[in-house]
Image: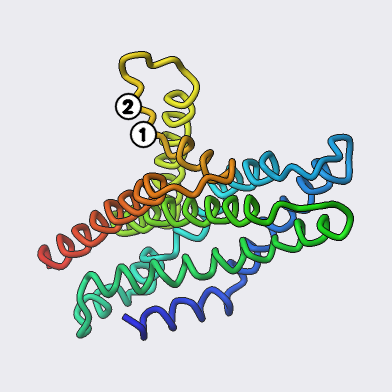
Amino acid sequence: MLAIYKKELKSYFTSLLGYVVIGVYLLLGIILFNGYFLGVKNTNDFSGFFGDMNTALLFILPVLCIRILAEDKKLGTYELLLTSPVTSTEIVLGKYLAVLTFVTIGVSITLFFPVFIGFFTAIDWGIIFSQYLGLIFTAAFFLAIGMFASSIADNYVVVGIVTFAIFIFLFILSSLIKSIDLQNFNFLKDFSFLVHYQAFSNGLIEIKNIVYFLCGIVFWLYLAKISIEVHLWKD
């Protein structure tokens, strides 16, 4: 697994795609930062900024997800990978942890923004830490979905479309559950990732929110593992 992790992580830092993705994300961060803190809003409340940066991940991550397994299929190395002395679990975890590490590094670069504001006004670093934790958990959750999408499709375009479609479906569903009055069905809000992310955004680091994201990550990675094993069984 470690060999797969190192190989995949290196590929993100040696490919143009990786730098383009981080560059676009940071550019969006600069634009949002200017609007929230240097423009008309002029505030040191980062909740709106992180909320928009979190939404941006929905559009940025599918670009990375298309190469997780689909690239091996395109290059003809997928069969070689499956027949190598590693388990399907090691393949999934190695590739997943590599892309998650890359995204985490990219997200961490945006620490520049609160640090910069900290020179001019008081910053609640406890809330900032919680908001970053929410960003990382959200990214980890959606990358797990992308891992599954990449395991069931061979074509870059198909992987991108499937990944983005699942992202948008979950985002819309979560938004509806979060916003409407469910009355006797209030328990459904526990299935909304936005509800759990909002807790982190508000500075609340609770076990139930961490468990939600971890369970979601394990679920989608397990589906990816099953998909790989089915492909191996067919061959």
Q: Residue at x 48, y 77 (%)?
A: 9
**Residue 167 in picture, x, y percent from top left:** 45, 42
Q: How is the image coloured?
A: rainbow
Instruction: Count neighbours of disc 2 (C-alpha within 10 A) and say few if under 14, some if 14 to 19, many if 20 or more.
Output: few
Query: What's the distance in space between the residues labelled 2 and 1, CA to CA?
Result: 6 Å
Residue 126 horizontal side relative to residue 149, left or right: right
Instruction: Count neighbours of disc 1 (C-alpha within 10 A) and say few if under 14, some if 14 to 19, many if 20 or more.
Output: some
Q: Secondary structure at mark 2?
A: helix
For residue 67, the mark is none
Q: Along the line of sight, which residue is nearer the eye, 145 or 181?
A: 181
Mark 1: amino acid: Asp
**Residue 220 in picture, x, y percent from top left:** 30, 52
> Where is 119 relative to 36, above or below?
below
Q: Which residue is mark 2?
A: 187
> For the N terminus, which image quadrant?
bottom left
**Residue 26 in picture, x, y percent from top left:** 71, 58
Mark 2: amino acid: Phe
Q: Which residue is mark 1?
A: 190
